[in-house]
Image (cartoon, helix red, strand yellow):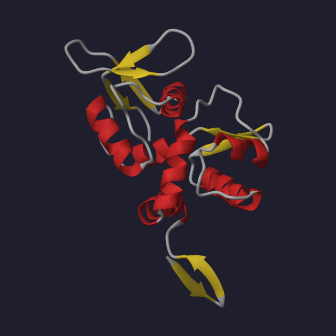
């Protein structure tokens, strides 16, 4: 993963592949981080998240993180790996970059992809669980953001299994998606 070039350690991975590569390695090899990332992504991105460690600690969600220094490290990794963003000092679960990275590896432009295939792929490569065809809020946010950016198109075909996007307001459903650009 690292190589020495002229006395300087550098990633032995092309820069455009570094984040997806490191994300897969971190999630595959660090069970504690994987568990904490799952819990982080279960949070609702539209609810106010806690800013300071004392309040975060009281939630009891992050049992492997025991102090503010560890929380800071976790927050930096979450942002670097594309699983969250910082807005106005708050760490928000927003895996848009990670989902886009996964989709970039799928080469089926302009073909319909079943929602079940997409969910299997995302749950295999990212720290998500999809229960009862209702997507977690953070994953719903990412999919809707990618649709708005023109990266994907969502379709609801009759007689196909549908997934519900957990968004504020009226529920939205899709059964298939197209890759517009990834």
Q: Is residue 162 left or right of residue 127?
A: left
What residue is at 52 percent from the left and 28 percent from the top? 137
Viewport quadrant of the C terminus? top left
* Residue 17 at least partly seen: no
List x then y, in percent, for residue 42. 52, 37
List x then y, in percent, for residue 177. 34, 28
List x then y, in percent, for residue 58. 70, 42
Q: Is residue 122 left or right of residue 74?
A: left
Q: Is residue 38 left or right of residue 77?
A: left
List x then y, in percent, for residue 107. 32, 45
Q: Is residue 100 above or below residue 136?
A: below
Q: How many numbered marks appear?
A: 0
What residue is at 39 percent from the left and 24 percent from the top? 134
What residue is at 80 percent from the left and 37 percent from the top? 88
In the current view of this chain or complex, which residue is farthest to the top? 170
Q: Nearer the viewer, residue 147 or 158?
A: 158
* Residue 163 at least partly seen: yes
What residue is at 30 percent from the left and 30 percent from the top? 115
In the current view of this chain or complex, which residue is farthest to the left? 159
Q: Is residue 154 left or right of residue 76?
A: left
């Amino acid at each position: 993963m690292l190589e020495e070039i002229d006395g300087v350690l550098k990633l032995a991975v092309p820069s455009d592949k570094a984040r997806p590569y490191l994300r897969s390695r971190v999630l595959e090899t660090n069970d504690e981080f994987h568990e904490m990332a799952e819990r982080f992504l279960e949070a609702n991105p539209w609810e106010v998240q806690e800013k300071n460690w004392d309040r975060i600690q009281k939630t009891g969600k992050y049992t492997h993180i025991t102090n503010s220094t560890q929380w800071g490290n976790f927050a930096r990794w979450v942002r670097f790996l594309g699983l969250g963003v910082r807005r106005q000092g708050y760490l928000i679960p927003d895996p848009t970059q990670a989902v886009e990275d996964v989709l970039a590896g799928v080469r089926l432009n302009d073909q319909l992809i079943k929602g079940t295939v997409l969910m299997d792929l995302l749950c295999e490569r990212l720290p998500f669980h999809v229960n009862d065809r209702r997507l977690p809020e953070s994953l719903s946010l990412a999919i809707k953001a990618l649709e708005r950016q023109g990266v994907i198109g969502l379709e609801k075909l009759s007689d196909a299994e549908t997934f519900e996007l957990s968004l504020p307001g009226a529920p939205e459903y899709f059964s298939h998606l197209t890759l517009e650009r990834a």
